[in-house]
Image (cartoon, helix red, strand yellow):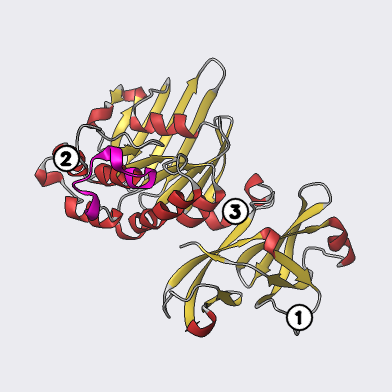
Amino acid sequence: MSGINLAFQQVYADFSLDVKLSLPGRGVTALFGTSGSGKTTLLRCIAGLARAGVGRLEVNGEVWQDDARKIFMPVHRRPLAYVFQEASLFAHLDVRRNLDYGLRRVPAAQRRVSLDQAIELLGIAPLMQRQTGTLSGGERQRVAIARALATSPQLLLMDEPLAALDVQRKADVLPYLERLHDELDIPILYVSHAPDEVARLADHLVLMAAGRVTAVGPTRELMTRLDLPLAHGDAAAAVIEATVSRVEPTYHLSHAVFAGGQISLLNPTLKAGQRVRVRIQARDVSLTLWRQEGTSVLNIFAVTVIGISADSPGQMMVGLDANGSTLLARITQKSADTLQLRPGSQVYAQVKGVAVVG
């Protein structure tokens, strides 16, 4: 049976975990929540690093744990790899020998990812002879991920792998994580509390709070559900899938089409026909009753209001349907009242800023 099916229950002194999930057997699933929500505890139970009082885990048809049948596969026998916040590299070995250590853990007949493939995916060929102490934080994490892939895991666990990096190093590593998503047929469970990482990488999303699952489903759907905290606050955003239709190098613009129309992106490096994932922050969306002319805003879409919810004091979050794609707009309560917004209202969304995230 394809997929990851799990159920764990454990009571700690000041915290309890009670989770039951069925997750896709491929792609990136993000475990998202605030600190203390149980994300890392769940990941450790999956790895076998922590043993829940009651647990069952099946990965793509193979049972790794079933307490009812007294089955518990120890961590060293589970065909998985675990990437931590801090790159745990061997300081006395250079990059090449760190990777060789990972490779030796897997018999040649069971290798699904070659060392050359791992090196190429993470872009670390120039680092092979370097001592790990001379690497930047981003380089160290890329080497750690390559070493994890060298073990040819059937499941890759990543526990906030970018949390220890500054903004620039994080930006350097994210494109390599996208390549793992696009080019490897290995399911990835990715722990994060950063909405931008989730929007960029995850196909599927699990929201957690106080050791419980509060919602699970496709990332695009959960990010715009007004009954969930992810769709509120300054970081609220929608993710849409679009296809590049043409590029205007003179203006450094690419134009892409999606269900709601055409969207212009300040990115001249894209190519016609390329699929892109676009993040639109709710704070960058304004609403009008009529389509505006003579405006500097390039992205204007006809939308229908599908929901309105209180956000911060004096502000409202508005859910919008753009011909099947969902957007969010964060506007003042006065603006919502002035426009007399109601579910079903026909308005125009003006998007002043968009970001290509994948």
C-alpha separation, residue under disc 3 versus residue under disc 2: 42 Å
Mark 1 residue type: Arg
C-alpha separation, residue under disc 1 versus residue under disc 3: 27 Å
Q: Which residue is mark 3?
A: 223
* Residue farthest along the top direction in this orientation: 13
Image position of 248 with respect to 341: above or below: below
Q: Is residue 137 magenta?
A: yes
C-alpha separation, residue under disc 2 versus residue under disc 1: 61 Å
The image shows residue 312 at horizontal and vertical percentages of 77, 47
Q: Which residue is mark 1?
A: 291
Q: Please give the name of the residue rendered at 64% of the width and 51% of the height, measured from the top-left corner.
A: 235
Front label number (3 vs 2)? 2
Q: Which residue is mark 2?
A: 97
Could you tell me if residue 248 is visible in this image? no
For mark 3, give the secondary structure. loop
Q: Is residue 271 magenta?
A: no
* Residue 138 marker: none
Question: Which is nearer the N-term, disc 1 or disc 3?
Answer: 3
Image position of 272 with respect to 185: above or below: below
The image shows residue 330 at horizontal and vertical percentages of 73, 58
Q: Is 199 displayed left or right of 126 in the figure?
A: right
Q: Which residues are magenta?
A: 125-140
Mark 2 residue type: Arg
